[in-house]
Amino acid sequence: MQYFIADLHLNESQPEITDLFLQFMQEKAPLAEAIYILGDLFDFWIGDDEQSELITQVKQATCKVVEQGVPCYFICGNRDFLIGKRFAKESGMTLLPDYHIVDLYGKRTLICHGDTLCIDDEKYQNFRKKVHQKWLQWLFLKLPLSLRINIAQKIRAKSKQDKQHKPIDIMDVNKAFTAEIVEKYQAEWLIHGHTHRQAVHSNQHFANSDRTFTRIVLGDWGKTASILTVTPDSFYFNEER
């Protein structure tokens, strides 16, 4: 079996979510063939040089699982897109590109965080384009750690405020664009997070075609964990089959 998770938004103010993650890594993860974390593992990330008890716990948990022979793969989200090679090395995880194809027991599957599919949110897409410029990231990471933390907190507060005034629809994926991306990668399944809307959307149609694909959306973590389990015969969230 293989596990897929996303949108934990780990932070010091919600230790219960960290506990859920550590429990998952200790009890479920060692039994898997592979673990895929599809972004926003952390609530925000300001550089691989940041150190905290939370970050250390995560690194130790993932390293232990990898040492047991279970590979852990990571795709950056919109909150932790600055995670880099140093963190990957210290956590034992393998970084993947924004879009990546995996073979899930014969199903050609496209995986991503999901924010790139929400093209109707033009304000966010413009922001994303700016902050993903390598030169700007290089400059930001050269700033003192304390200043980066302050900047990140202001951006997060502004984002939370803006989100309250956005129509719900534009914060979801654009279905036509999503179908184009899935068709481009010739995938049968799409697995993503970001929208926090755990669901399985079957029979999603490609444009001008009778062919369909399945879109599986990972949920966020709170009082419970949203864990997608994929086996050779089925897939399901948590223990609900």
Image (spheres, rainbow, N blue to C red):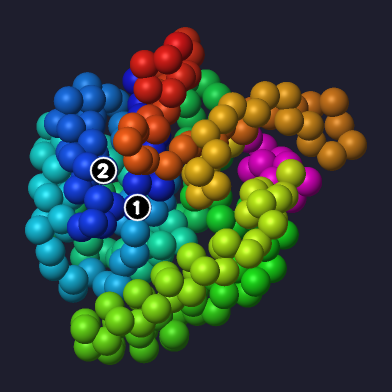
In the image, residue 229 lies at what x, y percent? 39, 23
Decide: few, some or many residues near mark 1? Use Cα within 10 Å; few <14, some 14-19, many ≥20.
Answer: many
In the image, residue 75 lies at what x, y percent? 41, 52
Q: Are marks 2 and 1 in contact (CB under 8 Å)?
A: yes
Q: Amino acid at mark 2?
A: Ile
Q: Residue at x 35, y 46 (%)?
A: 8
Residue 27 seen in the figure: yes
Q: Which residues are magenta?
A: 176-189
Decide: few, some or many residues near mark 2? Use Cα within 10 Å; few <14, some 14-19, many ≥20.
Answer: many
Q: Residue at x 27, y 72 (%)?
A: 47
Q: Which residue is mark 2?
A: 17
Q: Residue at x 39, y 33 (%)?
A: 226
- At numbered mark 1, what does the secondary structure look like: helix, strand or loop? loop
Q: Of 219 and 233, which appears nearest the observer? A: 219
What secondary structure prevails in the magenta region?
Answer: helix
Residue 182 part of the magenta-drawn span: yes
Question: Which quarter of the figure has residue 157?
Answer: bottom left
Q: Amino acid at mark 1?
A: His
Residue 151 part of the magenta-drawn span: no
Question: Which quarter of the figure has residue 84?
Answer: bottom left
In the image, residue 169 lies at what x, y percent? 70, 50
The quadrant of the picture occupied by the C terminus is top left
Q: Of 49 and 34, which appears nearest the observer? A: 49
Q: Which badge, 2 or 1, comes first in the chain's sequence?
A: 1
The label shown at residue 47 is none
Residue 89 seen in the figure: no
Is 163 placed above or below 182 here?
Answer: below
Q: Which residue is mark 1?
A: 9
Q: Is residue 30 left or right of residue 130?
A: left
